[in-house]
Amino acid sequence: MALFLPGRTTCAACGEVIGRDDDVVLFPHGLFDPRSVLFRFDDACAHHACLTGDELWREALAALEFFLRHPVAFVRGLDED
């Protein structure tokens, strides 16, 4: 899981510092393919508001939610089809 230091860690979506009172989402390492535009969220942190405010970033949030519901699928390489 990403390392989060309130007031020091920057958002992978907007590049701004994530404050102590901000809603933050932490992504694990290895969730995204290095060739994907979403790879910027691999082992990173982002403001929840940034992720829900952009259609592409919502895909990153959806991938995280899928991972949290089905972690074994990622270990075994199960396709999402």
Image (tube, grey):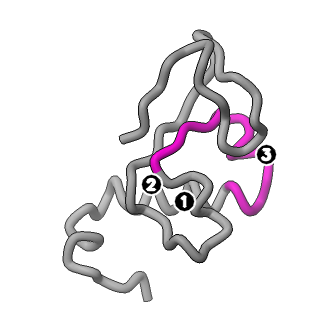
Q: Position of residue 58 (x, y in %)?
A: 67, 56
Please give the range of residues in magenta: 43-57
Dot 3 alpha-carbon crowd within 10 angstroms: few under 14, some 14 to 19, many 20 or more: few
User: Compared to 63, does 5 lie above or below?
Assistant: above
Classify residue 60 as left or right of residue 51.
left
Q: Is residue 75 left or right of residue 18?
A: left
Residue 61 rendering spot, x and y as whole percentages: 56, 53
Residue occupied by mark 3: 53
Find the distance from the CA under tag 2 to the CA under tag 3: 17 Å
Looking at the image, tell me whether mark 1 or mark 3 is earlier in sequence order. 3
Callout 2, which amino acid? Glu
Q: Measure the alpha-carbon separation of dots 2 and 1.
A: 5 Å
Q: Are marks 1 and 3 in contact (CB under 8 Å)?
A: no
Under tag 2, what secondary structure?
helix
Residue indicated by mark 1:
62
Residue 65 is labelled as 2
Q: Is residue 52 left or right of residue 45?
A: right
Q: Is residue 11 magenta?
A: no
Q: Residue 65, position in %: x, y? A: 44, 54
Q: Amino acid at mark 1?
A: Ala
Disc on res. 23: none
Residue ID at (22%, 70%)? 75
Q: Amino acid at mark 3?
A: Gly
**Element carrying mark 1:** helix
**Are circles 2 and 3 on residues that touch, CB within 8 Å?**
no
Relative to the observer, which residue lies in front, 17 or 50? 17
Secondary structure beneath label 3: loop
The answer to the question of whether label 2 and label 1 lie on touching residues, with beta carbons closer than 8 A, is yes
